[in-house]
Every structure is written in C-alpha cells, then in structure tokens.
Amino acid sequence: METKQSLTITDNRTGKQYDLPIENETIKAKDLLQIKVKPDDFGIMTYDPAYMATASCKSTITFIDGDRGILQYRGYPIEQLAEKCSYLEVAYLLMTGELPNKTQLDEWTASVTTHTFVHENVKKLMDGFHHDAHPMGMFVSTLAALSTFYPTAKRIHDPAERRLTFYRLIGKVPTIAAFAYRHSVGMPYVHPDNELSYAGNFLSMMYKIAEPKYKPNPVLERALDVLFILHADHEQNCSTSAMRSVGSSHVDPYSAAAAAAAALYGPLHGGANEAVLRMLDEIGTLDKIPAFIKEVKEGKGRLMGFGHRVYKNYDPRASIIKRLADQVFEVTGRNPKLDIALELERIALQDDYFVKRKLYPNVDFYSGLIYQAMKFPVDMFPVLFAIGRMSGWLSQWEEMLLDGDQKISRPRQVFLGHGKREVPMLSQRA
Ligand code: CMC
C-alpha cells in the first residue's frame, strides 16, 4: 500500500482537520496559515528562534548528516575532496556543481589568478586603519568597500557579471587578508605572485620579506589548501544565512559578502578557533584541565571547539585536521598546546556531561593549533576561515538568486509587547 505523504492536523479550537502535504520530509509553513479560528485571523505560524527546525531554502550544494558525521559537497565526501583536490577545484565544484576537467581547471585558475591584484586605492583605504586594528574588522570593511570599486556588480541578474564577481572575490580575498596582516605588523604589502598556487601565493603575501621569490614549504602550502577546502561550505550556517538573507534584498554580492564575513567574526562561529587557543592558554598546564572541565559543567564557560548545531557526532573536518596537524608539526615543530587539547578531548569524550549532549570536537578545535604553528597570529584565524568560505558564500548566494521560491528575507515575529497606548507629554511621565 502506498503511504500517504501528508500530515493531518486537528485544530482543537475549532475541531477542524487539515491535510498538509509532506515533501522532502517537510511541510510548508505557509500551509499552516489556512488554520484559523476567525476568517480574518492571520493563521497559525511556527515559532522557531535560530531556525532550529526550519528549512529556509532548498539546496543542492552541501549535504551534512550530523548524526553520522557526514559532510559532502555536491555529493563528494569531504575526505576524498581533501585528499584528491585543490581548493580551486573545490571552489569550481561548489559553484558549478561539477568537478572541473583539466581544461576547465586551467581556465578557472587563470581567471581567478588574473584577479588577485587590488586597486591602489584599496591599499590606501586599508592604510587608514589604526595600527592595531583587528584584521577581521579590516577584512569586513574592505569587502564592503570593494562594491564601490566594482559598481557593475549590481547587475546581479547578468550571469557574466556574476562570474566576474566570483573571479574577483575569490582572487582578491587572500590579498586583502594578507594586506590586513601586513598592516597590523607594519610591514609593506607584498603584491600577489601569480606563478604560485592559491595557497602558496597567500603565504608569499603574508611572509615574504627581502627574498626575490618566496618559496612556500610544500607541506604547509598543501595543509593550508586543505584547510581552505574544509572551510569552503557548510550549508546554512550563520554567515551563509547572512549572505543569503542580505543578498535577498538584491544588494551587490560584495556588500552581501561583507555581511557574511561580519557574521563569521563572532566567537560562536568563525571566531571559535581563536577562542580555543585563548582557552588552551588560560588552562596552561595539564593538571588544570579537571578544574576547567568542572567549571564548564557548572555553566561557567564553554569548552570552545566542542559542540555543533548540526553535528551530534565527531565533525569529519576535525578528524582530517587532526591528521593534518601531525604533518604540519613535523615541519614546524610540535605546538605545545596540542597536549592540552588532546587531553581535553580525551576527558570530554568520556564525560557524561559531554556524551549526553553529544558534544564532540568541531572544525575549530585543532585548526587553531595548525594556524599557530604556521605563524598566523590568532587575530588572523577568522580571516583564514573567510578566505576558504568565500566560494561557499558565493555559490549559496547564486543558488538563492536563481531559486524561484525565494523572495526578500523577512521573518515573522510573535508580538508580546504592549497593546496600543497614548503618548503622554514628557512632563507627565513618571
Ligand atoms: N561546552 C559546554 N557545553 C556546551 C557546549 C560547549 N562547547 N556547547 C553546547 N553546550 C551545552 C549547552 O550548555 C547546552 O546544555 P543544556 O542543555 O544543559 O543547556 C547544550 O549543550 C546544547 O547547547 P546549545 O547552546 O543549545 O547548542 P547550539 O546548537 O545552540 O550551539 C554551538 C552550538 C556551536 C554554538 C555551541 O556548541 C558552542 O557554543 N560551542 C562552542 C563554540 C564553538 O566551538 N563554535 C564553533 C562551531 S563550528 C564552526 C562553525 O560552524 O562556525
């Protein structure tokens, strides 16, 4: 017998029954609006702060099975992409839906690479920041400023214009990120070296000093590229939702990307790996771990780098990063904080508090240790995340734009405030 794909709801206020179709394991929230007591009622809404159980879009980009610890981009497991592909291949995959062949990859790489330079006035703009400005603040502002350099990006319905914006944004984010760093340490900006790989060029712009040509260490170059892959997309997270929501007003993609980057700046999102290192520093020595865990369990703080809205199992990106850390530490020497991190993980994975709440290491638990070993200052961590995530933001933004179901984002509210009141004169107010 064929199962009926619908949900029957009885409104006990009226005794009426409603049959709502189920598609893709979801009902349409708008179908609930027909459930009313009086004809002029608005209808039943769902209350779902933070979108805990509400799908805001249909997507074909990234699949996550949080209970089983699975992450796939366009159907390909993250483990295989991290092993067999470069970041630029993955960015192409996210944007087009398919992995590039050799010719497509060459063209794509050339197009991104020819857009790595920024206008001289972008440099002047960045010079205007205070010497100790947080690089993520500089990054967010410079992304927004780019919209003024490329006003034709407003033509968001022109596929060629969108493509150009993809080249520009993916090409320029490493440059802006490196310039933000160089500004903060008072070093001259290093121009992009278009003979190097995406990650290699970024390392060159970060660390080149007087040598005529910077030669990135191949292990570190590959590790960074893999980290960009692991951060490239993660379905409807906070920053991607910001990209889609702001983009739904049809603002240009530079402004929407600035909003997404701003969302990523927060400690509960892209700032978490920075918070992990600060936490490891605070703990300091192995013997302090039990007291720290006790405080977390008493609600006096969180074990940063643990827990995830979607993963209720080991974050697959964390496993890859843990392995990557060994390769990086062979080159850079072992980060002494690793011992504290490993012990924290060991204790937390056995502790009832964390087990019961399904709190496992997430992508940020070990990434900070690698970044630090590669000499990235802690302030740069969210910026590194943003470089990798740009391809995901842009793919999700374009998917939103081409989705006929989408409109300007505009959530509803449950109003619990005052009824109508008369405004008293200032002298009459208590
Ligand atoms: N340490 C201690 N307790 C935690 C933690 C943690 N890291 N995360 C969640 N909990 C507890 C929380 O107190 C709550 O307990 P109770 O049910 O007793 O009130 C329960 O677990 C559920 O937590 P929640 O806050 O309702 O879960 P959420 O889905 O809203 O939060 C999270 C997800 C990632 C914001 C949260 O786990 C957290 O704050 N983790 C630390 C920050 C972090 O590592 N963020 C990086 C996320 S991964 C990178 C990214 O995608 O941006």
Image (cartoon, rainbow, N blue to C red):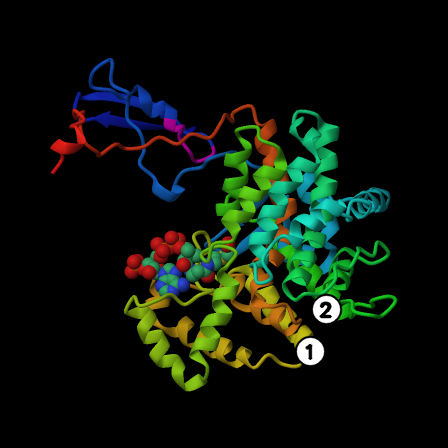
| Residue 344 seen by the camera | yes
- Give 106 or 60, whichever is nearer the viewer: 106
Point out residue 332 in the picture as x, y percentages from the top left corner. 69, 78
Q: Label 2 sits on what residue type?
A: Leu
Q: Identify the residue position indicated by label 1 in the image.
A: 332
| Residue 355 picture quarter | bottom left
Numbered range of the magenta stretch: 24-29
Q: Secondary structure at mark 2?
A: helix
Q: Is residue 402 left or right of residue 179?
A: left
Residue drawn at x 31%, y 69% as measured from the top left? 297
| Residue 82 picture quarter | bottom right
Point out residue 130 in the picture as x, y percentages from the top left corner. 58, 58
**Is 288 placed above or below 371 here?**
below
- Give 422 or 71, whichever is nearer the viewer: 422
**Is 4 placed above or below 318 here?**
above
Disc on res. 220: 2
Q: Which residue is at the far top?
A: 39
Disc on res. 373: none
**Is 337 placed above or below 47 here?**
below
Q: Secondary structure at mark 1?
A: helix
**Is 345 placed above or below 316 here?**
below
* Mark 2 vs 1: CB contact within 8 A: yes
Quadrant (top left, top right, bottom left, bottom right) of the C terminus? top left
